[in-house]
Structure formats: structure tokens, C-alpha cells
Image: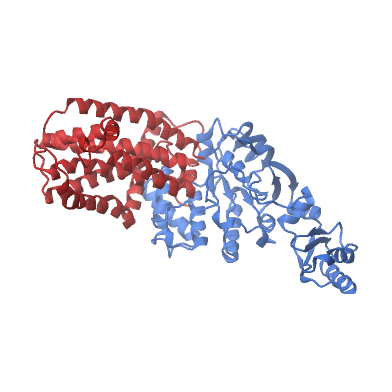
Chain colours: A red, B blue
């Protein structure tokens, strides 16, 4: 029937080394597939690139004038780290929706019935989405520069800010992967994403100084991870005290990975 | 196609299932089923939505763990030796599990890569399958532009990339138009001729009849009948006469008029006024008698016809109740079935 050399079921299990190599190659295959899909769907590009650009322009030119901040370079410098973090967080909508769709359409069933590495579907999804996120972040930094944003603290801290934003995005991605697989229905996943991502990014130090919020809201905004991450990013981009926020950010990110990575893996295994 | 089997139970059946049970909360999807499928044969698993067909397929393809019982595919346990089972099976589910944004060729190449073929081999295998499934012309178009039938063919092609020894097809023609359905039957027949063992679930008696060597009928998680298509049809009682009585008050007269013709009791649905009756192998002869009888009683009927026994008839004969359209919560993937939801009736 075919000329292709093909290995039929072998007795026994393949060795650890071969399995490790397969895990890597399977992850790359899934990554490649996800990036191909992303590039084919204009809506995805609009959602991940055009929307944050509109946010930059909106806050820079429409709301920004009314928001007083004590930051070197004015509101645009205050704004950009916040927008970047929010962009990274919102990019994970794509993660949750894609996984829910794959589940619904039976793609994940197909993959799970194949002799491929079980970790590859999730790993490939996270690698592709993190790459996509990094591209988006760099575009937003570019747009920021065009509307007057400047890194005021040197090149290395600027790079570290981008790295932190990406790691933060990856952490949110892991949560999104869990929700996508656990909920498993595209529309519900989307609605759920709105419910938690909007408050947690807007009720933070992303767009306005927290002191301008009512007291009860300050209590939340001051003590939630997005604020810690944005404050750290801001300190990296503009200079200023960083210690306290940096450690809290790292602790939160580590905590998120520790809790949600196993949950996402479990949801994948159970996604039946 | 060479079937080199290196499994430990080379001479045993390709699929062996013993006492398999699975519950989803309160719902007992499988209540202890046994199956045995000899190598190179086709088993048709027939049953209505929610009977447990998909649950059984999901267990056999390592997607779901059974609560009790055991299942072997090519002599390997689907729970303890899941990885080995996955190397010898192919699965094509109820919906086309393809990436619609990618082309047909890309879909197959990616599956090939995930079966750890080299890039050149993955490309070659994709080209072969596209040819075999008559998809060459559309190969480089995004799969979302494919017709339903083409998507299902692509999905089936994807399940064959790894040259499986045992193929599982879960309702392969549900939601397809009659022409695509016939095309799919042709493809499935050629696969079987190549020596692949096939387990096929279906809601359609004619499909099982057409493709399967053996048929098991599943209802509410139990095997309620097994045998060849002929044996099952014998139990149904052959052809069925069916008509509607618009005037509900005359149903009793109609039943009286035809009750002597049939093999058993006529089946009456008082709500819709539909009367049906098995007439064995005496199809057209019985039809004429029915027309005479009804005419003599002066009962007006609509849509009087002779038809082949349907799944509903099989169920009626085997269980005394009609094939119900129920979906257990165990099948949790909402929206997956969209297409074929109400096609049971059309199959008759």
C-alpha cells in the first residue's frame, strides 16, 4: 500500500532517550502547527496586535490627559508598562479558546489516541503562544516609542522588563490553558476570560495611580499580582525602587506555575 | 499492506473486551459489555445516541479508563499498555478532527510528523493518502473550504497515517449527505480489503449491514444482541409496512384491518397516528393485502409504504421500546454531534 518506511508497533517500550527526543520534536511540531494557524487567521492577528495598539492610542491621547501621574516623562511612560502587561495577559484568551476549540472538535482526542508525547500538546501550545506574545510585546514597545515612550533606565533593565512581561504572560497562559481545558466550550471560555482578566488588569496600577481609586478598591489593587508585576516593570523601565515588588512578583509567578501547571496537565489528561 | 504483528497474542482476536463498565456520576454508560473481533474483520456496533457506543470506543482507544473489566487491542491492555495500543490503532471520531485553517496536506504532514516520520516520509505519506482519498485537487486549500464529505475523508486519512492494524470509526457517516455516505462506504470497504481490522459504530442498520461481518446491538450500556446482519434482520421480521392515520379515532379500525397480515402486533403511535407492522419477507404481497384491508374498512391513510427495517424496528423487536434520543452527561463535549443529531429517522 505504501512505499514509506514505517515502524510498526515494536515489542516493548522505546528507550528514555528516544522518548525525550520525541517529546521535543512533537512539541516543535505542535508549536509549528499553532503558529501556522495563527498566521492564517486575520482575526487572531487583529486581536493580539491591533487591539493593544488601539489601547495605547486611546489611553495616550484620549484618557491620558486627564490622569495626573508623578513619573519622569509623563503619562505615556507610566502607561506603557501597564499596557504591555495587559497585552500579555489578554493574549492568553487565544490559548484558552484554541484549546477549548480543539477539545470540542475532537482534535485533542485524535492527538491523545496517537503515540506522540503526551506533554507535547500543552507544551507546544505554551511555546507557540509565548512566542506570539513576545512578538506582540515588541510591537507594542515600538508603538510606545512612536508616541513618546522612552526607557529611562538603560538597556539591560529594559530587556529584563520585556522578559518579565513575557514570563508574566506565560503564567497567565498556564491559567488560561487550564480554564480552556476545564471548561471546554469556546463561548463560555471567552466569557470567563472577560470576567477575570478585565478586573484583574484594570483594577491594578496599569492605567491610573492606585491612590485615585476608592479605599476599598485600593485594598484589592494594592495587593494583587498584576500590580506587583506592573510596578516591577515600571521600575525596570523608568528606574526607582524595585526590591519589594520584584520579590512579590516572582513569588506570585512561581505560585501560579506551581498551582496551575499541574491543574492544566490534569485537565488535559482528563479532557475526555 | 503488510500486517506484521509483534504483539504477544498474535493468534488472538484483534479486539477483546470483557465485562467492561464505565459510569459518569449517576449515569451507567457501560454496564458490562463483552466483544471479540477477529483480525481482519469488521465489527459493527449498532445503537442509538447515548447507548454507550462512543464510550466503548473511547476506552478502546485509550482516551478513557474503564471502571471495571478489561480491554485488549492487538493483545495489549488499553490501560496498562496504552502507549503500545496507541501505536497500533487509528481513530476517526464523529466530527472531523482536523485543523480547518491548515490545508489538507499540512494536516496530514503534521500527523505524520507526530507519528515520528521524517519530513520527507511525512510528505510522501500525505501525498499517498491524498491520492487514495481523492483529495489531491483540494490538497493545498484550507480544510475549512472542504465540503463535509471531504472533511470526513481527510479525517479518515489522518487516522491512517500511522498504518494502524486496528481502526476505530465512530459514526463515520453521521451528518453526511447520501452521496458522501456511499463514497465513505466505498473507502471503508477498500480499507477492509487491505486487511485492517475495523470497529465501526453506527446508528444505521443499513450501514452495519453494508460494512460489517458481525454486528452487536448496544442499548443502555449493554449488548442486547449479536450476530450477522441476516440473523438480526431475521429477528426484526424483515420488511415493515407503515402508514399514518390522520383521523385518530380510526386507528383502532386500521389496526384491526391489518393485524392478520403481519407477523406480530402492529406498532401504534397514538400521538402521530403512525402505524407500523413487520411483515417478514412477504413485502409487496403484504402491502397489497394491507391496501385491500384498509380500503374494505374505509380507513383513510397517508404515506402508506413498505420499507426496510430500520434501527427503530430492530430496537422495537429486541427491546420492546423505540430507540430513544438520549444523551448521557458522560458525553461531555458539547456541540460535537451537531450534524447527525436527528438523522436516525432518515435512515429508515
Rendered image quadrant of residue B266 = bottom right
* Number of marks in picture: 0
Residue at coordinates 45% horizontally, 56% vertically from top-left? Answer: B128
* Figure check: B58 above or below B230: above
* Residue B164: image location, x then y, percent: 53, 45
* Figure check: B179 above or below A118: below
Q: Nearer the viewer, residue B174 or B303?
A: B303
* Figure check: B23 above or below A32: above
Residue at coordinates 68% horizontally, 49% vertically from top-left? Answer: B47
* Residue B198: image location, x then y, percent: 61, 48
Rendered image quadrant of residue A78 = top left
Give the left or right position of residue B319, taking residue B56 as reference.
right
* Residue B7: image location, x then y, percent: 57, 35
Give the left or right position of residue A191, taking residue B22 as reference.
left
Q: Nearer the viewer, residue A235 or A138?
A: A235
Q: Answer whether residue B266 is visible to the viewer in this image.
A: yes
* Residue B318: image location, x then y, percent: 78, 49
Give the left or right position of residue B124, taking residue B51 as reference.
left
Amino acid at each position: 500500500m505504501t512505499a514509506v518506511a514505517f515502524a510498526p508497533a515494536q515489542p516493548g517500550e522505546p528507550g528514555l532517550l528516544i522518548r525525550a527526543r520525541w517529546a521535543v520534536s512533537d512539541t516543535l511540531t505542535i508549536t509549528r502547527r499553532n503558529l501556522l494557524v495563527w498566521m492564517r487567521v486575520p482575526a487572531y492577528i487583529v486581536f493580539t496586535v491591533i487591539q493593544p495598539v488601539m489601547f495605547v492610542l486611546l489611553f495616550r491621547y484620549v484618557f491620558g490627559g486627564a490622569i495626573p501621574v508623578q513619573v519622569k516623562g509623563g503619562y505615556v511612560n507610566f502607561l506603557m508598562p501597564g499596557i504591555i502587561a495587559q497585552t500579555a495577559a489578554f493574549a492568553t484568551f487565544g490559548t484558552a479558546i484554541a484549546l477549548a476549540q480543539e477539545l470540542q472538535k475532537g482534535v485533542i482526542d485524535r492527538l491523545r489516541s496517537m503515540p506522540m508525547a503526551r506533554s507535547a500538546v500543552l507544551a507546544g501550545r505554551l511555546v507557540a503562544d509565548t512566542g506570539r506574545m513576545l512578538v506582540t510585546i515588541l510591537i507594542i514597545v515600538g508603538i510606545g516609542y512612536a508616541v513618546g515612550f522612552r526607557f529611562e533606565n538603560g538597556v539591560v533593565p529594559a530587556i529584563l522588563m520585556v522578559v518579565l512581561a513575557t514570563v508574566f504572560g506565560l503564567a497567565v497562559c498556564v491559567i488560561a490553558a487550564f480554564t480552556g481545558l476545564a471548561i471546554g466550550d469556546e463561548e463560555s471560555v471567552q466569557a470567563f476570560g472577560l470576567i477575570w482578566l478585565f478586573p484583574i488588569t484594570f483594577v491594578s496600577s496599569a492605567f491610573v495611580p492606585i491612590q485615585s481609586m476608592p479605599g476599598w478598591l485600593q485594598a484589592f489593587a494594592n495587593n494583587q499580582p498584576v500590580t506587583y508585576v506592573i510596578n516591577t516593570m515600571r521600575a525596570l523601565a523608568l528606574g526607582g525602587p524595585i526590591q519589594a515588588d520584584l520579590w512579590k512578583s516572582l513569588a506570585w509567578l512561581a505560585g501560579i506555575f506551581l498551582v496551575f501547571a499541574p491543574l492544566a496537565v490534569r485537565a488535559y489528561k482528563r479532557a475526555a | 499492506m503488510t500486517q506484521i504483528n509483534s504483539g504477544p497474542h498474535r493468534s488472538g482476536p484483534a479486539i477483546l473486551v470483557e465485562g467492561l463498565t464505565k459510569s459518569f456520576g449517576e449515569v451507567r454508560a457501560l454496564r458490562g459489555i463483552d466483544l471479540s473481533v477477529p483480525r481482519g474483520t469488521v465489527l459493527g456496533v449498532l445503537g442509538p445516541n447515548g447507548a454507550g457506543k462512543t464510550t466503548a470506543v473511547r476506552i478502546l482507544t485509550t482516551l478513557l479508563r474503564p471502571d471495571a473489566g478489561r480491554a485488549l487491542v492487538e493483545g495489549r491492555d488499553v490501560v496498562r499498555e496504552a502507549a503500545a495500543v496507541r501505536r497500533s490503532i487509528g481513530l476517526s471520531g464523529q466530527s472531523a478532527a482536523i485543523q480547518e485553517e491548515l490545508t489538507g496536506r499540512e494536516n496530514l504532514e503534521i500527523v505524520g510528523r507526530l507519528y515520528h516520520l521524517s519530513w520527507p516520509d511525512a510528505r510522501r505519506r500525505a501525498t499517498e493518502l491524498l491520492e487514495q482519498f481523492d483529495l489531491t485537487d483540494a490538497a493545498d486549500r484550507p480544510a475549512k473550504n472542504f465540503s463535509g464529505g471531504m472533511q470526513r475523508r481527510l479525517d479518515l486519512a489522518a487516522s491512517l497515517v500511522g498504518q494502524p492494524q486496528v481502526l476505530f470509526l465512530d459514526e463515520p457517516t453521521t451528518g453526511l449527505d447520501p452521496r458522501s455516505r456511499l463514497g465513505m462506504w466505498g473507502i471503508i470497504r477498500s480499507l477492509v480489503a487491505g486487511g485492517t481490522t475495523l470497529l465501526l459504530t453506527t446508528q444505521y442498520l443499513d450501514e452495519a449491514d453494508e460494512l460489517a461481518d458481525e454486528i452487536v446491538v448496544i442499548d443502555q450500556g449493554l449488548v442486547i444482541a449479536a450476530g450477522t446482519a441476516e440473523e438480526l434482520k431475521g429477528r426484526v421480521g424483515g420488511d415493515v409496512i407503515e402508514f399514518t392515520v390522520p383521523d385518530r379515532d380510526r386507528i383502532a379500525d386500521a389496526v384491526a384491518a391489518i393485524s392478520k397480515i403481519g407477523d406480530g402486533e402492529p406498532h401504534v403511535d397514538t400521538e402521530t397516528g403512525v402505524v407500523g407492522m413487520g411483515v417478514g419477507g412477504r413485502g409487496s404481497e403484504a402491502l397489497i393485502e394491507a391496501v385491500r384491508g384498509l380500503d374494505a374498512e374505509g380507513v383513510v391513510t397517508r404515506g402508506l409504504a413498505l420499507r426496510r427495517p430500520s434501527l427503530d424496528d430492530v430496537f422495537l423487536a429486541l427491546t420492546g421500546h423505540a430507540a430513544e434520543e438520549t444523551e448521557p452527561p458522560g458525553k461531555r463535549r458539547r456541540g460535537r454531534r451537531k450534524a447527525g443529531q436527528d438523522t436516525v429517522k432518515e435512515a429508515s
